[in-house]
Image: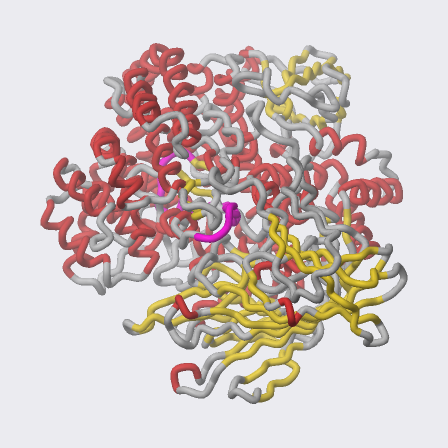
Amino acid sequence: MSYKLQTFDGINEPSSLATSQDGLYNTPSRKSGCYVSAKTGFILTFLAMATAAMVGVIVTFAVPKTDSSDCNCGATQAPVVGNPDCTTPSTPSTAAPPPTATCPACPDCPTSTMHTQEMTSTQMTTPDMTTSSPTASPSYRLPTSLLPVHYTVRLRPDLYSKIPANFSTPGSVKILMNCTENTNNITLHINKITYDNSTVKVFDSDGKTLTVSMISENKELQFLIIHVNPGLMAGNMYTLEMSFTAALVDDLAGLYYSTFDRNGTTMYLAVTQFQATDARKSFPCFDEPALKAKFNITLERRNDTDEFRDYITLSNMPLERSYQTDDGFIADVFQETVVMPTYLLAFAVCDFKYLSNATENWTMNTYASKEEYLETAFALEVGVDMLRGFEEYFEIPFVLPKLDQIAIPDFGAGAMENWGLITYRTQYMLYNPNVTTAGTHRFVAVIVAHELAHMWFGNLISPQWWDDLWLNEGFASFFEYVGVNFTRPEWNIHDAFAIENMHPAFSVDSYPTSRPIFATNVNSPDDIERLFDTITYQKGASVIRMMWNFLGPETLRKGLSNYIKRKEYGNVRHQELWQALSQQAMTDGKDIDVQDIMDTWILQQNYPVVMVTFDNTHIRAVQSRYVLGNTSEGTHSPFNFTWSIPFTFTSSQGTNYDNNDIHWIYRNQTEATFDWTNTIDNSNNQWLLANVQQFGYYRVNYEEGNWRALIQQLKVNYARIHLSNRAQIITDLMALVSLDSVNISLALSSLDYLDQETEFVPWYAALGEIGYIRNMLLTKPIFGKFEAYMRMKLETIYGKIGFKGEEGESMNNRLLRSYIVGGACYYYNKNCTEHAVGLFNDWLNDETQLIPPDVKSRVMCTGIRESRSDTWDKLFVRMASQTPSDQAIILSALGCSREHWVLERYMTYAFDDTKIRRQDARSAVLAVIYNPLGRDLAWNYIQRNWNHITTVYEMSGGNINRILRGLASRLTTQYQRDQLAHLRESLGGNSPYTPFFDNALQDVDLNVAYVTKHYAELENWLNEATSTQGV
Ligand SMILES: [Zn+2]
């Protein structure tokens, strides 16, 4: 799906965007069914940064929309987590291992969920249908005896009563099917749809009715099984028709309703999210990606009152005609679609307005509420540039006559690439120069690029099955950068690829519990949802970028173009991709067996670290597996954890960061030696640097002398090292500390040059690493020295960048500002604090005195930190009248108080929905946890009020999980660990929260070990660093 979210672990102030992500976790509970679908998380790359300077650790993960799920087959509520990555570590290289899947089965569901629906007695004549329980490992795949060819779908999303309990979507479907082998039943998908058996009809190609002898539903498999007499014969076409009523609830899945406020009135709209397995919730269908067909869609709406006069409907294709139904509705009939899978269908019913740009071959429209649609202008402008850019790049035109993009108030993922009707969460599509942060501005372009890339990767060609989901999401994530570069080349967005993709991927791919990109055992909807994770998106994109480098950009481009042309409207497996690329390489005179190389990157988990040594004539490169923690689990690999590594290097003897000379270290070859004629001398601060621009998905280690020479180069003239490699040096070193391959003082000395650094990319990488160290030291005696060190490192750049830039300054500078100002104020830079307080008070006294958007979050936090409760109260009241994104900023800023009782009161407000909306409770609690003064207070509050929080307030399991992980990221002592374990034990062994506690305990264990092992050395290093530099 669509887009993944990167959140970050902020101190007190998740940025506006990070906070807005809260919507992801707090979306309305799905109260039906025994599974929870983890609508993707998605990565929101720089957003978090927007105001989050120094906020530290960047956490990248796909987060499930975890909610307490109410089994409809039992009364017990079981918090469930649908995505193993939901609890990915909150720290970079030193993080806790990603937990194994924590998706407890719905405990009270009877194992037998199959039931036979009543047929008319005369028809119940063929008792050949088993009604026994599904087997232990049921096949969730449909039989292939019938293939859908064409659907006619008619739906009437009925939300006009304005009483959600009365909403529903009556509809009908007619499916033309090709019978490929004899069968006596039609098996297709259905979920949470009611129907009257008498409407189910089956016809042969002559229009003759076949007898339906029995209809049954297997609720676990979500199968509707229609037995037919006589059987269906191979080679013939059949038609199934039925009427039904689908639910229309606010569960963000299938066709659901969403709301927004217009002048105090709640407005309703209906919209879809079908990926991965929820088309079957809207109408019965063959809901697998390879079962493609054409669709004729008709959507009915009302326009007979003033209130609904402006309602429109949208679908994948342009409107063909409209007519009035007998009972007064308007039926909108859309043009027939191209051949496509069910998961890419989309419908919307709303009263939105739009902007439009017609090109020669297609029209792009951007829709939002009439209050907001003008703010879609940027998404439209870059969208047109990028769609044209992709057409040229792939040499394949966009195949539909129109492409709508629509901003949806309640949306589980970030966006969804429905063919011809892309849906976005509202805040990721709107841009207003007066209020939008640099991070959001950039992200709007990034997410549009991602979704438009899907028009080729995913839509024109789709994976044969979800196990190759990375063919969609890895490519869309890679092409974000290519797409943005079409329209905003001055943003130099490629430079940020590694920090946004490779580093987060390393972070989750460092543990035995990681998984290969190409997934195995993917069957059930839950299995599928779990794949929308960091491995699919960011590791997928990272290995594609590696191919881009070793094949060469043009070979990759032509190879992909041929691959798509060959398979358009069809389905693909990764083997076909390898074949197309190998062929293109051969055509271009390159002898590269792509499959042989790339299988090592997609069929095994983890990644290599390459130890590089050299003398005057040779470079020796030794590969080994980078893995942390207990390797007894998940140790199987078809390649014995060796990889075919495209090794590259440059050196101080003549730096060349565009050098594309690949030196292969092959799989099953742990060591490779390359001739080398240059001579460098580490003792003269000359150095060798491997993995140029960090194109390769591997880490690098050197002997200490070379590391010291590189670090010295950073100090003397950092510009001689490419900015991607500056970020790499810092992050590789910190990761090697976790392997015990280098000592922490050496790693920390890579930060020394930061007071000179002026580029966003290395700062971003450094602040991620520093954030973890900060969390480890928060309440330690040495923290004052750490603060002083950070003030010192930030002072120069803060002086340069300030609170406001020149008109037309670069995007990277704007992004950097939010970090630097955030960090300077966080670490009590006097000028920063005074300036922030001034801006805050000006705004508090006069709302027209706008705070610059890129620093708003830190300004608010600092304003609250430096004031008393009367100001807090004023801001709390002010919050209600702000825009949603500013409300999110304020919600976090309120956690910045230094008054203990104010924080305690904020905790009570968090769990009182007359004070704070339920969807914001988690953000408020995390804001207190991220305040160093609030951590213990919040934890004590949670322990004292556990029952209230979980059983009276009924906070969702997903939110509890996030709170526990947020807390765990800052716990560093055995005593704190014991407290956490004690609460876990007191809940009993069967508590649904046990897996969350286990994940949190793992984090704390690693923190305790880290502090135990490294504290003394950290202390020495800080003493030295601050004394020698006069702090
Ligand atoms: Zn996507």
In the image, 652 versus 914, the foreground residue is 914
User: Residue 911 location in percent, x, y?
Assistant: 24, 46
In the image: residue 628, left or right of residue 1012: right
Query: Is the magenta region chiefly helix, strand or loop?
Result: loop
User: Residue 785 location in percent, x, y?
Assistant: 26, 21
Which span is picked out in magenta?
A: 31-57
Q: How is the image coloured?
A: secondary structure
User: Residue 233 location in percent, x, y?
Assistant: 87, 61
Does the magenta segment cover residue 53? yes
In the image: residue 352, left or right of residue 917: right
Q: Residue at 37% of width from left, 71% of height from top?
A: 163
Please say whether residue 383 is visible from this viewpoint.
no
Does the magenta segment cover residue 643? no
In the image: residue 251, left or right of residue 791: right
In the image, 87 versus 48, the foreground residue is 87
Rendered position, 21 above or below 662: below
User: Residue 262 location in percent, x, y?
Assistant: 33, 72
Q: Residue at 52% of width from left, 35% of height from top?
A: 84
Rendered position, 630 above or below 723: above
In the image, 516 versus 552, the foreground residue is 516
Rendered position, 142 above or below 544: below
Q: Residue 315's quadrant in the figure?
A: bottom right
Quadrant including the C terminus: top left
Q: Residue at 26% of width from left, 22% of height from top?
A: 783
Number of disc labels: 0
